[in-house]
Image: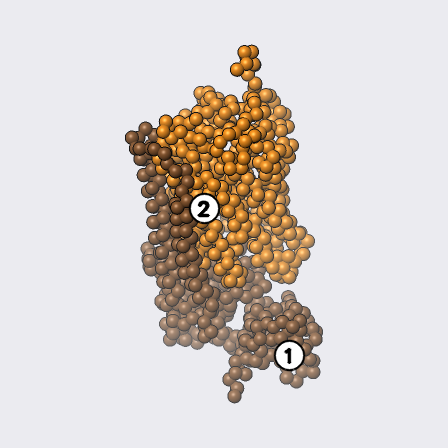
Chain colours: A brown, B orange
């Protein structure tokens, strides 16, 4: 089913497996609908009024038949359910080594931040053969990032991060669409994914440098907003240090724990009074309205880089 | 037989011809007809919106309309078709007209409430017309937040008021039907002697009464957030946009069953009559109606597999969605088995009913695709979904609505219509529908998103086919207006039971008198007592 009519390529490692599911669904549908229609037409013809077919007393119910036609669809449905659910689990579970790229959606464009600091709009350059994880948020309404050639789609919400991953398997350019109605120019909120050979991708990265890596850009934001005044090593305020926190579980004041990921860091910057880490007073002011989504993502990248530095140290 | 010839009792139509007598009537039959007029009016408003969209989509570029205009058109099409046509279509018209007749009652339990429901419907409709005149609304019929609450610059609150209000007419109708079926059945008419149409109305009424209040609350919250800027759904105000989707689909998924359960009831009556056989597996048909109504409340999250909902919630909703497909398949098998050893004839109502089964199967089986998680990730929010729900809600439900119109037309009006014209319309409708919507399955499969004013040129051929089908469909929808209009004025008299159908509604005159029956009927056996051997009714 790949390259259907020339414009439905399968360009990710999952696409072929999802196509297999779609093909199975097509076959089941044709068989079931075709089969029942054939029976209806046959009955309607054979037992048309005035036909010589023997009528005789027909059962008005049959327990055997009823059990059969409850059980058979149920079994078929359960097989499809399990197959589709297992694929879905994979679609929703990005590999740990995936290259994380940030996407900020707004009416009506896609803004992309690469970890190396490169930025682009309505285009997404990625290397072939490497899992890519998109960390996405919206500045306004709900959007949905859809790449038909990869058979993936994920809504992009304001106020939280959603993720989407894929591993491109074929070089080329593929449409990137918005699939959730988002206002006037919804149908114009389109772009392209450019899948490149690794060496071409490296060259592309070099040709389009940002102002430092994303983490470095985040450090600039960090200093500009005076975060180090409390979170820095020499700070006198009792605030948690940020090195090494990313990817760990933190204990909360209310007794629970939370995974320190992109979403938690974002919430801690914008709504610091909720989910306070145990042992620290809730004194941090909210930065709601002072930082835009791209700055927050840069800050997340910076804090994440602190964790990486910690791991790199002996 | 009385030896004194009683003066024939006037039919419900002949009781009085004044407009006032119609607008103040408590007669369930007249209220049903008031609804017919109203929903037909709204049907054509929404159909015109669809027609303009199909013209725009003839070319990939958005060259006929402004993007905002296109967005308003699909919103109006959805809002009006769903709440002002499909939800009331069969229950408020045929349900109102037939339910008391089928159970041998003189009227519904609360005739004044019944009339009130039509006025409430009309008030809701007035808000929709005000919305349209003021400039429309562009949120899509799903009113997703925060777009609807914070970003749309159109007349959202007026539209929401209309939908909020019209919901109460559903609640009134549902409440009325539930009480009527419980309290007003004729002597001898126990629960398992009820025609399946009555069971279908009953199951539908349960859904109406239980689900609609949730919609009303949700829309009220949307209006509150939009007007007062209280954070409920908008994350910028501390709200949660997924909360809206959960609440909305908690109503709007069961709402699909409000549209399709009554259609199943109609088709069961029609198939039995024109196959001259009792409906196969009557009890399983009842249980599956109730099963669909109940399990249908637990599957709303299948609209949200890519919304950011937890993936484990997604798996539970997927499994439940597969389960709700089982009773639907039972119904298809049982209708098929009803034809076996029948004496099948193909008058217009039967053609529409057979068309229903075909389209319902195609819409239902593609529901399986969308319940399958990984397939849904690719297909959701594309034209595949558009095709899927149009097969169920337009293909199936509207075919059944037309089947009902043709089947009970002689009872309602006392006149016959030209059979060959009616058969022609049924066939044209089936062809036009498939031509309009089957290409949309393919477009969606290939990745064309829905609600696109302009679209990539790869999809042009499919869209041209779809627009051509829409034109054929339009002819099929106008044809019945012509020949049924003719029948109203010139059609030959029908007699009380032109199809040889069973059921209490056929035992009274056509059109029935004000109080339905001259003598209160008694029931002493199961429904569908057809005599297959002789190929006619009792």
- Answer above or below: position of A257 versus A149: below
Label 1 marks which chain's residue?
Answer: A
SS label for mark 2: helix
Front residue (pair B193, B513): B193
Q: As rendered, which of B404 and A284 lies closer to the eye?
A: B404
Residue found at x 60% / y 48%: B215
Name the residue nearer the viewer: B472 or B427. B427
| Location of residue B393 in the rendering, given as x and y in whole percent from the top left corner | 47, 43
Relative height, residue B442 to residue A100 (above, below): above
Q: Is residue A17 above or below residue B417?
A: below
Q: Which residue is mark 2?
A: B328
Quick one: SS at disc 1?
loop
* x 53%, y 37%: residue: B191
Q: Quadrant of the N terminus of chain A?
A: bottom left
- Furthest residue in direction bottom, as rendered: A314
Label 1 sits on residue: A240
Q: Are marks 2 and 1 in contact (CB under 8 Å)?
A: no
How far separated are the C-alphas under marks 2 and 1? 57 Å
Task: Name which quarter of the figure residue A147 lies in.
Answer: bottom left
Comparing labels 2 and 1, the label whose residue is closer to the camera: 2
Tell me which corner region of the image, top left, top right, bottom left or bottom right, holds residue B471: top left
Residue appearing at x 46%, y 47% in the figure: B327
Q: Tell which subunit mark 2 falls on.
A: B
Mark 1 surroundings: few (<14), some (14-19) or many (≥20) residues within 10 A = some
User: Is residue A63 something one can see in this rendering?
Assistant: yes
């Amino acid at each position: 089913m790949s390259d259907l009519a020339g414009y439905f390529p399968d360009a990710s490692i999952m696409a072929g497996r999802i196509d297999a599911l779609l093909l199975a669904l097509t076959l089941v549908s044709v068989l079931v609908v075709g089969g029942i229609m054939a029976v209806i037409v046959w009955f309607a013809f054979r037992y048309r009024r005035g036909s010589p077919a023997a009528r005789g007393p027909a059962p008005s119910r049959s327990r055997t038949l009823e059990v059969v036609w409850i059980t058979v669809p149920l079994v078929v449905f359960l097989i499809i359910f399990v197959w589709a659910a297992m694929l879905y689990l994979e679609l929703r579970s990005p590999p740990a080594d995936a290259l994380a790229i940030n996407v900020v959606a707004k009416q009506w464009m896609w803004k992309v931040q690469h970890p190396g600091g490169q930025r682009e709009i309505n285009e997404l350059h990625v290397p072939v053969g490497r899992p890519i994880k998109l960390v996405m948020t919206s500045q306004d309404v709900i959007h949905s990032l859809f790449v038909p050639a990869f058979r993936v789609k994920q809504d992009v919400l304001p106020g939280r991060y959603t993720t989407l991953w894929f591993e491109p398997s074929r070089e080329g350019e593929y449409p990137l669409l918005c699939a959730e109605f988002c206002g006037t120019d919804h149908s114009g909120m389109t772009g392209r994914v450019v899948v490149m050979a690794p060496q071409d991708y490296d060259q592309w990265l070099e040709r389009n440098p940002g102002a430092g890596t994303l983490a470095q850009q985040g450090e600039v934001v960090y200093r500009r907003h005076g975060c180090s005044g409390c979170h820095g090593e020499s700070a006198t305020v009792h605030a948690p240090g940020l090195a090494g926190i990313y990817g760990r579980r933190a204990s909360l004041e209310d007794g629970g724990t939370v995974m320190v990921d992109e979403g938690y860091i974002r919430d801690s910057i914008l709504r610091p009074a909720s989910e306070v880490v145990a042992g620290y007073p809730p004194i941090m002011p909210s930065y709601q309205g002072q930082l835009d989504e791209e700055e927050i993502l840069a800050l997340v990248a910076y804090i994440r880089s602190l964790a990486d530095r910690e791991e790199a140290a002996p | 037989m009385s030896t004194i010839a009683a003066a024939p009792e006037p039919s419900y139509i002949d009781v009085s011809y004044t407009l006032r007598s119609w607008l103040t009537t408590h007669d369930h039959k007249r209220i049903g007809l008031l609804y017919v007029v109203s929903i037909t009016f709204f049907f054509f408003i929404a159909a015109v919106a669809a027609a303009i969209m199909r013209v725009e989509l003839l070319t990939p570029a958005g060259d006929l309309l402004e993007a905002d205009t296109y967005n308003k058109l699909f919103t109006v099409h959805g809002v009006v078709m769903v709440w002002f046509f499909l939800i009331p279509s069969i229950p408020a018209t045929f349900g109102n007209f037939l339910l008391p007749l089928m159970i041998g009652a003189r009227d519904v339990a609360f005739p004044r409430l019944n009339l009130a429901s039509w006025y409430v419907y009309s008030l809701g409709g007035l808000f929709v017309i005000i919305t349209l005149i003021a400039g429309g609304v562009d949120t899509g019929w799903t009113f997703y937040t925060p777009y609807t609450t914070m970003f749309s610059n159109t007349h959202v609150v007026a539209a929401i008021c209309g939908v909020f209000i019209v919901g109460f007419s559903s609640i009134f109708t549902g409440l009325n039907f539930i009480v009527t079926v419980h309290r007003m059945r004729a002597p001898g008419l126990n629960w398992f002697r009820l025609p399946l149409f009555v069971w279908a109305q009953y199951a539908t009424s349960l859904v109406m009464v239980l689900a609609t209040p949730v919609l009303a609350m949700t829309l009220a919250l949307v209006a509150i957030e939009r007007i007062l800027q209280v954070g409920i759904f908008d994350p910028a105000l501390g709200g949660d946009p997924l909360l809206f989707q959960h609440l909305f689909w908690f109503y709007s998924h069961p709402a699909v069953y409000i549209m399709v359960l009554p259609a199943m009831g109609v088709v069961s009556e029609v198939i039995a009559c024109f196959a001259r056989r009792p409906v196969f597996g009557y009890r399983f048909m009842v249980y599956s109606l109730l099963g669909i109504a109940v399990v249908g409340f637990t599957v709303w999250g299948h609209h949200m597999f890519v919304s950011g909902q937890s993936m484990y919630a997604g798996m539970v909703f997927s499994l439940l969605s597969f389960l709700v497909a089982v009773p639907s398949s039972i119904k298809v098998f049982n209708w098929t088995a009803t034809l076996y050893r029948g004496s099948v004839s193909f008058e217009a109502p039967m053609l529409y009913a057979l068309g229903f089964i075909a389209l319902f199967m195609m819409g239902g089986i593609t529901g399986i695709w969308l319940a399958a998680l990984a397939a849904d990730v690719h297909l959701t929010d594309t034209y595949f979904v558009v095709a899927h729900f149009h097969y169920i809600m337009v293909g199936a439900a509207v075919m059944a609505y037309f089947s009902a119109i043709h089947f009970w037309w002689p009872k309602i009006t006392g006149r016959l219509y030209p059979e060959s014209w009616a058969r022609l319309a049924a066939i044209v409708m089936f062809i036009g529908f498939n031509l309009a919507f089957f290409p949309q399955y393919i477009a969606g499969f290939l990745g064309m998103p829905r609600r696109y004013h302009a679209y990539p040129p790869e999809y042009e051929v499919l869209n041209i086919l779809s627009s051509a089908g829409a034109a054929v469909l339009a002819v099929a929808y106008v044809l019945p207006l012509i020949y049924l209009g003719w029948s109203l004025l010139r059609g030959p008299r029908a007699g009380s039971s032109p199809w040889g159908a069973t059921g209490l509604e056929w035992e009274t005159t056509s059109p029935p008198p004000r109080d339905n029956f001259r003598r209160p009927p008694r029931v002493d056996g199961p429904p569908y007592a057809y005599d297959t051997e002789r190929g006619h009714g009792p």
